[in-house]
Amino acid sequence: MFGSNLAGGTSREESGISSYNLMQEVMKYRKIDAHDHVGLSGARSGPDALQRQIDIADRLGIERLCISRPVTEEKGTPEEFREFNDVVMRAVKTIS
């Protein structure tokens, strides 16, 4: 938001840093996506959508995806919870 001089920092030239590859640095660390959804309407629905999520995770070096199908209503019934858990299980079985 602020230029380096406004924020009290130094410029790249002043600090001696000529270039920095953020993605190279990020790829050094293990990554887990702890919040991802499946079975929602639109582009995030079906086995193709889950495969796209996995492909993106692979490119970013994400080792694990923790997926869920959230109950979007204010109050979910036990049947809805079972149905949404079944959606997640079908997605996992489709990819496995």
Image (tube, rainbow, N blue to C red):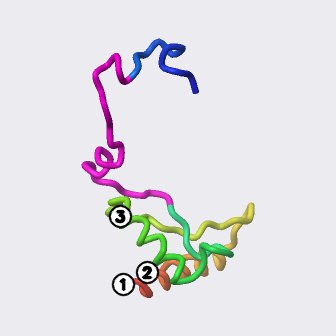
Left or right: residue 42 compared with residue 22? right
Which SS class for mark 2? helix
Please state the horizontal and vertical placement of residue 31, each as a whole percent of the image: 33, 54
* Above or below, 24 relative to 51: above
Of residues 21 and 69, the one nearer the viewer is 21
Q: Are marks 2 and 1 in contact (CB under 8 Å)?
A: yes
Q: Residue at x 61, y 66 (%)?
A: 70
Q: Estimate how packed mark 3 is, as few (under 14), some (14 to 19) or many (20 or more) residues with alpha carbons within 10 Å.
A: some
Q: Which residue is mark 2?
A: 92
Q: Which residue is mark 1?
A: 96
Q: Are marks 1 and 3 in contact (CB under 8 Å)?
A: no
Identify which amino acid the numbered label 2 is placed on.
Answer: Val
The reply to whether the magenta stretch includes residue 89 is no
Of residues 73 and 18, the one nearer the viewer is 18
Q: Residue at x 32, y 37 (%)?
A: 20
Q: Which residue is mark 3?
A: 64
The answer to which quarter of the image holds residue 66 is bottom left
**CA separation, marks 2 and 1?**
6 Å
Identify which amino acid the numbered label 1 is placed on.
Answer: Ser
Identify which amino acid the numbered label 3 is placed on.
Answer: Arg
Q: Residue at x 68, y 75 (%)?
A: 42
The answer to which quarter of the image holds residue 33 is bottom left
Q: Estimate how packed mark 2 is, as few (under 14), some (14 to 19) or many (20 or more) residues with alpha carbons within 10 Å.
A: some
Q: Residue furthest left?
A: 28
Which stretch is magenta?
12-35
The answer to which of marks 1 and 3 sits earlier in the sequence is 3
Q: Residue at x 30, y 30 (%)?
A: 18
